[in-house]
Image: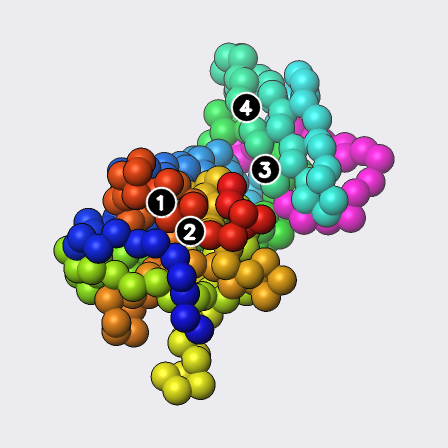
């Protein structure tokens, strides 16, 4: 498909999406957020699970044990309980402890709690409900941690893939005179474009582009979802954003490019 659009005749310094500082900061923030959730889950839920494992088979109702305050909340089938427990040690010392645990079950109106402890380790207070649901809690925590690890690995793989593809593209296109080529925009999200390039002679190539939020393509034919891309004559192609940033266009070059498009396709 011949394209009558005006691209600069000079070699262009391309800046493919994925190499910018914003992408690096976003990727690091996402990885740190997921890692933080992982560590939070281990600290808040894993510590109680380890402590309860030590008294699982030896816990009995604690002396003067009572629930100071606490509640269980449900989100669908996920039940989250937190409580402040108190009891009296054999020597008369007052004992208190904050306990929290999460398990999966069908919700019910109330969850009665009895404060229990191991007579050989009276300072560690827990509840009968926490011990009754010990296996359930262990599975719930394992599933949650596995899910977070999966999210973290996917985020890292996506970031590394985006960075690697952008580096390869920059190596193929940077500092060269580029030619216009039509690309099919199969799907467009806020941060991701799915693009098809090539044709019958060269074969179709599908690629997924991670782009900055708010990025706009330059349409050649909205009815057929064709957008403007560039290449150096080889298989590597890059879509063109409406601001011309990825091509490193000057203001005048961007204006000339937009002026060469049909009026109904200009921004």
Outermost residue, right side: 109
Q: Start and end of the magenta stretch?
A: 103-119
The structure residue drawn at horizontal position 82% and vertical position 40%, both measured from the top left corner, is 108
Outermost residue, bottom side: 201
Q: CA distance from mark 4 to mark 1?
A: 67 Å
* Disc 3: which residue: 101
Q: CA distance from mark 3 to mark 4?
A: 11 Å
Which badge, 3 or 2, is on the more N-terminal residue? 3
Residue 24 in sight from this viewpoint: no
Badge 3 element:
strand
Q: CA distance from mark 2 to mark 1?
A: 6 Å
User: Vertically, is 49 above or below 65?
Assistant: below
Q: Please state if 245 lies on the left or on the right of 177 as rendered.
A: right
Q: Please state if 82 lies on the left or on the right of 259 as rendered.
A: right
Badge 2 element:
loop
Q: Which mark is residue 98?
A: 4
Q: Which mark is residue 256?
A: 1
Asked if the residues shown at circle 2 and circle 1 are in contact, with their CB atoms under 8 angstroms apart, the answer is yes
Q: Is residue 105 magenta?
A: yes
Badge 1 element:
helix
Residue 29, percent from left and from top: 36, 37
Badge 4 element:
strand
* Disc 2: which residue: 260
Residue 31, percent from left and from top: 36, 43
Q: Is residue 75 magenta?
A: no
Q: CA distance from mark 3 to mark 2?
A: 64 Å
The structure residue drawn at horizontal position 61% and vertical position 22%, both measured from the top left corner, is 85
């Amino acid at each position: 498909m011949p394209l009558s659009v005006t691209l600069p005749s000079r070699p262009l310094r391309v800046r493919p999406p994925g190499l910018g500082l914003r992408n690096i900061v976003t990727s690091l923030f996402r990885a740190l957020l997921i890692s933080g959730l992982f560590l939070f889950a281990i600290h808040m839920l894993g510590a109680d699970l380890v402590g309860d494992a030590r008294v699982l088979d030896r816990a009995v109702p604690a002396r003067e044990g009572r629930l100071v305050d606490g509640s269980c909340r449900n989100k669908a089938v996920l039940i989250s309980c937190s409580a402040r427990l108190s009891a009296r040690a054999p020597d008369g010392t007052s004992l208190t402890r904050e306990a929290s645990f999460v398990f999966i079950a069908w919700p019910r109106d109330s969850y009665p709690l009895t404060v229990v402890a191991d007579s050989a380790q009276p300072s560690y207070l827990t509840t009968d409900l926490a011990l009754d649901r010990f296996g359930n809690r262990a599975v719930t925590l394992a599933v949650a941690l596995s899910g977070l690890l999966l999210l973290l690995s996917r985020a890292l793989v996506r970031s590394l893939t985006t960075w690697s593809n952008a580096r390869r593209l920059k190596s193929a296109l940077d500092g060269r005179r580029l030619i216009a080529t039509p690309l099919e925009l199969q799907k467009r999200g806020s941060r991701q474009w799915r693009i098809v390039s090539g044709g019958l002679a060269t074969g179709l190539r599908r690629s997924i582009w991670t782009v900055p939020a708010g990025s706009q393509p330059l349409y050649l034919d909205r009815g057929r979802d064709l957008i403007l891309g560039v290449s150096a004559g080889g298989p590597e192609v890059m879509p063109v954003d409406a601001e011309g940033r990825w091509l490193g266009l000057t203001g005048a070059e961007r204006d000339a490019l937009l002026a060469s498009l049909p009026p109904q396709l200009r921004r």
